[in-house]
Amino acid sequence: MRTSLVIANWKLNGDAELLKQMAEHFHQSEIQQHVSVVVCPPAVYLKTADVLLNAIGIAIGGQNCSEFEHGAYTGEISAKMLADCGCNYVLIGHSERRSLFAESDAVMAGKVQQAQAAGLTPVLCIGETLEQREAGELEHVIAQQLSSACKEIDFENLVIAYEPVWAIGTGKTASPEQAQEVHRMIRDWVAKQAPETAQKIQILYGGSVKAENAAELFSQADIDGGLIGGASLDTQQFDAICQAAKDK
Ligand code: PEP
């Protein structure tokens, strides 16, 4: 039996006021006692989030971490630094990092290893573009992204987020059946690498999840929650999505 997990990815949005609003709301809602809830604000707000959210049972995470531990890497933030700010999670390989900041498959393993060494749970984001899907390359792309990132890592401390690139921030959601098919593919892949972990690992869906479509997506057998972008900036809507994960 896997616990549901819902992660908010604020991207380059939000501020201390939104964190305050969220803390006040979730203090009343108490959904976090039934579903694991994580908020990933921009890094400069992590210390505030540590005080406001960790205190009420909502974990916090970084949106990215360096593949390096320390050194002359201007602008980078290490996994250890995120842990020092109160993080328990970190997103790795989000499609915006891959496409806008040229992060290749080659750096993912280092990031996952750094995150685990710092005691964080990496949330590895993978997903195909529309062109890749239409060209019949879906399974190959997913396997390639997984095998590049999952080298010498602990599968017991890993979350995988399936986010079809064509569904992120576009308003187009994968159908529950399309998402389930890929989640099953991912779980089968994990079963080949770490058979004892395959039924335990949490696999999240991300891509235009909203209050209206969350329940149907989360009802699928291999979907254990969601990675939520735009809709996580609206506290009421984010709460409704967390409720849908609870009702799974
Ligand atoms: C995301 O950023 O991971 C995401 C899924 O965004 P959105 O929910 O806005 O599509």
Image (spheres, rainbow, N blue to C red):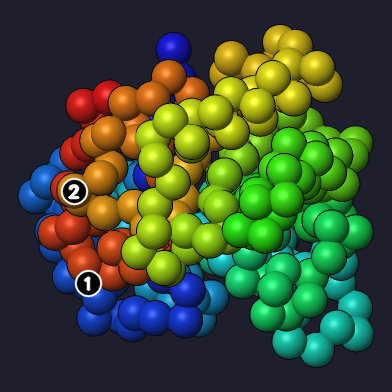
Residue that extends furthest to the bottom in the rendered view of this protein: 74
Whole-number angstrom distance, CA of label 2 to CA of label 1:
25 Å
Screen quadrant of the C terminus: top left
Q: Residue at x 59, y 33 (%)?
A: 182
Query: Which residue lies under the disc numbered 1?
Result: 20
Q: Which mark is residue 212?
A: 2
| Quadrant of the rendered image containing residue 80 | bottom right
Nearer to us in this view, 174 or 158: 174
**Numbered disc 2: secondary structure:** helix
Q: Residue at x 44, y 46 (%)?
A: 174
- Number of residues whose C-alpha sits closer than 10 Å to that of mark 1, classed few (under 14), some (14–19) or many (20 or more): some
Mark 2 or mark 1: whose residue is earlier in sequence: 1
> CB of residue at label 2: within 8 Å of ligand 1?
no
- Horizontally, residue 232 falls left or right of residue 8, namely left
Image coordinates of residue 96 in percent, x first then y, are 61, 71
Ligand 1, what quadrant? Answer: bottom left
Image coordinates of residue 32 in percent, x first then y, are 27, 40
**Numbered disc 1: secondary structure:** helix
Image coordinates of residue 200 in percent, x first then y, are 57, 18
